Amino acid sequence: MRSRSRVLVADELKHFLQFIDVSSDVEIEFLAADDPVPEGDYVGLLPLLSRRIDEAVLDRLPQLRVVANYAVGYDNLDLGVLRARGVAASNTPDVLTEATADLTWALIMAASRRLGEAERRAREGEWRWHPTMLLGIDLRGRTLGLLGAGRIGRAVGKRAPPFGLKVAYWDRVAQPAFESAIGARRIEKLADLLAAADIVSIHVQLSSETAGLIGAAELGAMKDGAILINTARGGIVDEEALCAALESGKLRAAGLDVYENEPEIRDCLKRAPNLILLPHIGSATEGTRRSMFELAWSNLMRGIRGEPLLTPI
Ligand code: 8YV
């Protein structure tokens, strides 16, 4: 009898198994969030972003052929070690682009119109209508500055024209089709983009080059009263510097879906009234999370069979 291929799948993904056919030659074991990766002859691993996949993990999985990350970001993977050991890796691009762009816009609207403060006041019953109550800003005529014009950055930019926002972007790679589609303008220096934008939205990957990219100096280079949005990775922004910029009024408001040390959110962020905080829900729609699983599963199956991955990293 041929032995079955053993794969490890993050426990939190059980729900999505109903959407796929599991071949009879594959044996799934679930990996609980707090449990270490067990030693064994597993050939595939389908982890969440919260699990770091490094040398220590790979030492326990000598037969591993593929890591199919359940996320588009892959800062949790030590790619150098994976490559050195001949383990393939994949992520889940495209399927979450639109959902994440929508959520980014939810934060842009919420921050510019003070929805966090407004919602709290309404719930607490602490309001009496007044013409200067909770005034936000008009978007029309302002500039949205995209830090990164990859798939998600461009999808965010494409939603801007109906709101009357101009779009500028900073990216190593020029995006001529994006520029001509919506009249976006490429700005080569980060400091120039920060100085030009009324709303800065972050869409770069977290890497050694982008960790701490937005610190006190960069926040200082932004326009007075600008807004910062981050749906990429918390580690790109210096959170203490952001707290200070919000407290001093340098920034009017900010919207965050991601944090440096998830699921913890530092106290100064929680205290800031002009900050919208979300618990990393950028891709959290039923359809998107299902599509992410289907894609990750297809990659896992291809990887264990030695076939080309659909979305290799
Ligand atoms: C996911 C994300 O919600 O894909 C990513 O990189 O940050 C989010 O879309 C999350 O990572 C799921 O593991």
Image: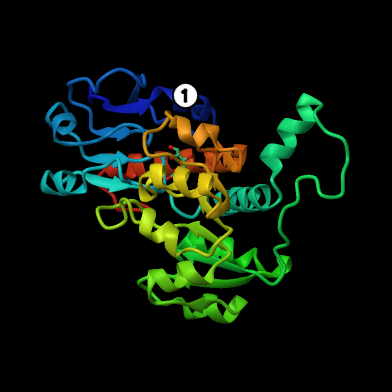
Q: How far from the left and from the top, in percent, is residue 86? A: 15, 46
Asked if disc 1 is less than 8 Å from ligand 1, the answer is no
Number of marks present in the image shown: 1
Q: How is the image coloured?
A: rainbow
Tell me the quadrant of ligand 1: top left
308 relative to 156 in the view: left or right: left
Viewer-proximal residue, 201 or 307?
201
Q: Is residue 263 above or below residue 306?
A: above
Q: Split into 4 quadrants, where in the image is the N terminus?
A: top left
Q: Is 272 rendered above or below residue 186?
A: above
Q: Nearer the viewer, residue 304 or 116?
A: 116
Q: Residue furthest front?
A: 248
Relative to 59, 128 lies left or right: right
Residue drawn at point x = 50 percent, y = 38 percent: 280
- Pinpoint residue 53: horizontal percent, then vertical percent: 24, 35
Is 307 positioned to the left or the right of 58 in the image? right
Q: Residues within 10 Å of mark 1 (few under 14, many from 20)?
A: few
Quadrant in which residue 65 is drawn: top left
Please tell me which residue is depicted at 43% across the width and 60% down the height of the picture.
220
Which percent across, then down, holds residue 171? 40, 70
Q: Viewer-proximal residue, 156 or 46?
A: 156
Above or below residue 255? Residue 170 is below
Q: Amino acid at mark 1?
A: Lys
Classify residue 155 as left or right of residue 88: right
Q: Quadrant of residue 183?
A: bottom right
Residue 169 appears in the picture as rendered: yes
- Dot 1 falls on a residue whose secondary structure is helix
Q: Residue at x 62, y 53 (%)?
A: 108
In x, y percent, where is residue 111? 64, 49
Q: Is residue 214 visible?
A: no
Residue corresponding to mark 1: 14
